[in-house]
Amino acid sequence: MSEKDKLEQARNRVIDSMAQNMNLYGITPSVGRLYGLLYFSEEPMTLDCMKDQLGMSKTSMSTSVRQLQELKMVEKVWKKGTRKDWYQSLDDWYETFSDLFSVKWRMAISANMNAIQKSLAEIDEMIENEQVSSELKAVAEEDKKKLEYALQYYDWLNRLVDSIESNKIFELIPKEKDK
């Protein structure tokens, strides 16, 4: 095996691993592979070049590039003397993680807190209703405690996301280990 083949094999191993793990962020393996291709590319690439490298349709490639642009993982760049669109990866993984994590978690936190608050209001009505049996009120009181605990957790999670968005997390956990 030539040294060039070894380098290609090493890159492909990492690209495959990245593609499989990007599902944690809601990104399909094919989009992850595209990001890996652009990450290791020495030069910006056109849709046609990416299509040829990955064997995907141009439509699928265009959709994937657009998704990576929305996630701030890829940017369009200008290249002198050509009218085609060229793309390159954005390689600040800390920023990418912060953006992805923040957006996804804020949506989940908001949805869960809204559901909890609505349920708490209904449970409070039930507890105050004199026609509800004492046994059912006792169960409702226990549920209320659980939901109040869940709200504390989501408040903490909001503050965690705040620390990521403000980069304060890096004061607690520096980007690089002390050497």
Image: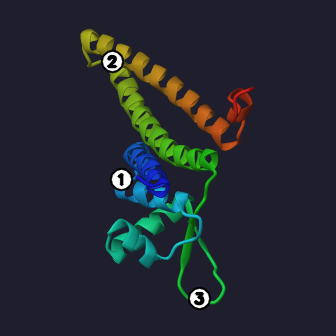
Amino acid on which disc 3 is placed = Thr
Residue 105 image point, x, y percent? 50, 41
Q: Residues within 10 Å of mark 2 (few under 14, many from 20)?
A: some
Residue at 59% across, 69% down: 43
Mark 1: amino acid = Pro
Q: Kindly identify the amino acid type of the residue bearing the numbered disc 2.
A: Ala
Q: Secondary structure at mark 2?
A: helix
SS at circle 1: helix
Q: Are marks 3 and 2 in contact (CB under 8 Å)?
A: no
Disc 3 or disc 1, which is closer to the eye?
3
Check contact, mark 3 vs mark 1: CB within 8 A: no
Position of the C terminus, as image quadrant, is top right
Please give the name of the residue rendered at 56% of the width and 89% of the height, measured from the top-left corner: 83
Colour convention of the picture: rainbow
| Residue corresponding to mark 3 | 82
State the residue position of label 2: 140
